[in-house]
Image (cartoon, rainbow, N blue to C red):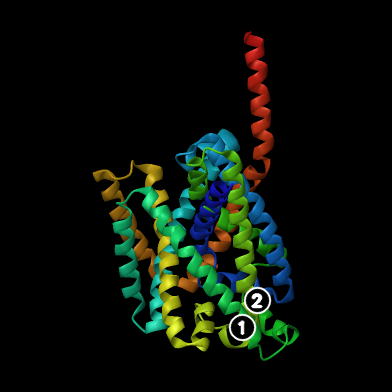
């Protein structure tokens, strides 16, 4: 019993780790998707939590059931031949796009905290990712999972501090929050778009993680706990930013700004954790991207990795806040194809199984 609990926690932790760097490590995403809707942003976070739990569970379960080695086979199996092509290409586009945003985010993090030019952080990140792409996938997954506990602790600390030191009520802050620009039209659209975006980001790795777990029950609960965990962390981040919106609304990395108010020393530590989270997501994205086209750890893969990273580095100069505002909602709308495929997946698998039984009984 204890052993399976540990396995469930490990899958959950890695699932949170993959999503966290892209989804809300900086706070910029939570600000645009949730806090900019004021009180309704809190309702949006509740909806997002329920969706994450269900979809996380489906991904790891499907991965385990099909013993997935890469996202490609599972996607075609649950989406069918025609929709499969669309979803496959959406995931490919997502992996590259989010990788680029992570390179830009690394630049922003070091720039806001230490005042170094943004391109220096981006260069360091690109070189780190290049080194990682030459490693085994298991090492990459372990790296991602190991940073998660630090982030969870940091977020809880930020939230408690923010709520204790609030100067005004949420009602007074709501109008300030609602004045923050968001490219999303409505809080419910925003919640669904955010989940869809993050599932598009996490799908490739979640399927592979599920594929590594033979026990379907463990894989299923790992995904469920991971998804619910992502939801709870979003709620914590949203409340923290909402309660301090009057001071942090204009910053690229609002969560980092809140910690700076607690203690500059803590902010330095947090910026390194953040850099780690951005690295783990970015490395995961580029790894899955390269693996989709070439066999990893071959000379061809190394050449392809270098070309990909150089392109990603050049694209990152569009700027972090601008990239988040443009890429994330777009990927969110595209990712709805994948969300739809995951919701109907259990019925499709049941139907396929029944079809196989009929075929075998006819043969007999």
Residue tagged 2: 239
Question: Residue 173, image x and y in percent?
Answer: 69, 85
Q: Is residue 70 visible?
A: yes
Label ID, residue 162: 1
Please state which of residues 342 and 146 is positioned toward the viewer in this rendering: 146
Residue name at image x 45 percent, y 76 percent: 270
Image-based side of 173 in relation to 78, left or right? right
Q: Quadrant of residue 275?
A: bottom left
Q: Quadrant of residue 159?
A: bottom right
Q: Gap in Å between the C-alphas at discs 1 and 2? A: 8 Å
Question: Residue 213, image x and y in percent?
Answer: 51, 41
Q: Secondary structure at mark 2?
A: helix
* Callout count: 2
Residue name at image x 67 percent, y 61 percent: 48
Image-based side of 362 in relation to 328, left or right? right
Q: Is residue 56 visible?
A: no
């Amino acid at each position: 019993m204890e052993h399976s609990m540990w396995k469930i926690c490990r899958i959950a932790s890695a699932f949170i780790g993959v999503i966290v760097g892209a989804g809300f490590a900086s706070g910029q995403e939570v600000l645009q998707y949730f806090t900019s809707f004021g009180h309704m942003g809190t309702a949006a976070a509740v909806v997002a939590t329920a969706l994450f739990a269900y979809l996380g569970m489906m991904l790891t379960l499907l991965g385990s059931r099909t013993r997935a080695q890469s996202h490609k086979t599972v996607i075609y199996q649950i989406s069918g031949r025609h929709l499969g092509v669309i979803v496959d290409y959406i995931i490919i586009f997502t992996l590259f796009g989010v990788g680029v945003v992570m390179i830009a985010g690394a630049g922003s993090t070091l720039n806001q905290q230490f005042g170094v030019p943004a391109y220096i952080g981006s260069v360091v990140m690109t070189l780190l990712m290049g080194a990682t792409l030459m490693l085994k996938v298991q090492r990459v997954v372990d790296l991602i999972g190991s940073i998660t506990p630090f982030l969870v602790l940091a977020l809880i600390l930020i939230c408690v501090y923010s709520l204790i030191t609030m100067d005004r009520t949420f009602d007074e802050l709501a109008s300030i929050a609602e004045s923050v620009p968001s490219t999303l039209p409505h809080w419910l659209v925003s919640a669904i778009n955010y989940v869809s975006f993050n599932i598009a980001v996490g799908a490739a790795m979640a399927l592979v993680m599920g594929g590594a777990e033979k026990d379907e029950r463990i894989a299923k609960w790992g995904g469920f706990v991971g998804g619910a965990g992502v939801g709870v962390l979003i709620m914590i981040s949203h409340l923290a930013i909402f309660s301090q919106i009057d001071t942090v609304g204009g910053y690229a990395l609002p969560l980092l700004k809140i910690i700076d108010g607690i203690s500059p020393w803590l902010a330095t530590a947090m910026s390194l954790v953040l850099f780690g989270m951005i690295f783990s997501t970015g490395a995961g994205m580029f790894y899955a991207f390269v693996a989709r086209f070439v066999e990893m750890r071959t000379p061809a893969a190394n050449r392809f990795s270098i070309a990909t990273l150089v392109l990603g580095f050049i694209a990152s100069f569009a700027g972090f806040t601008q990239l988040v505002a443009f890429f994330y909602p777009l990927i969110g709308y595209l990712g709805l194809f994948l969300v739809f495929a995951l919701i109907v997946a259990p019925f499709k698998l049941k139907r396929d199984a029944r079809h196989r039984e009929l075929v075998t009984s006819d043969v007999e």
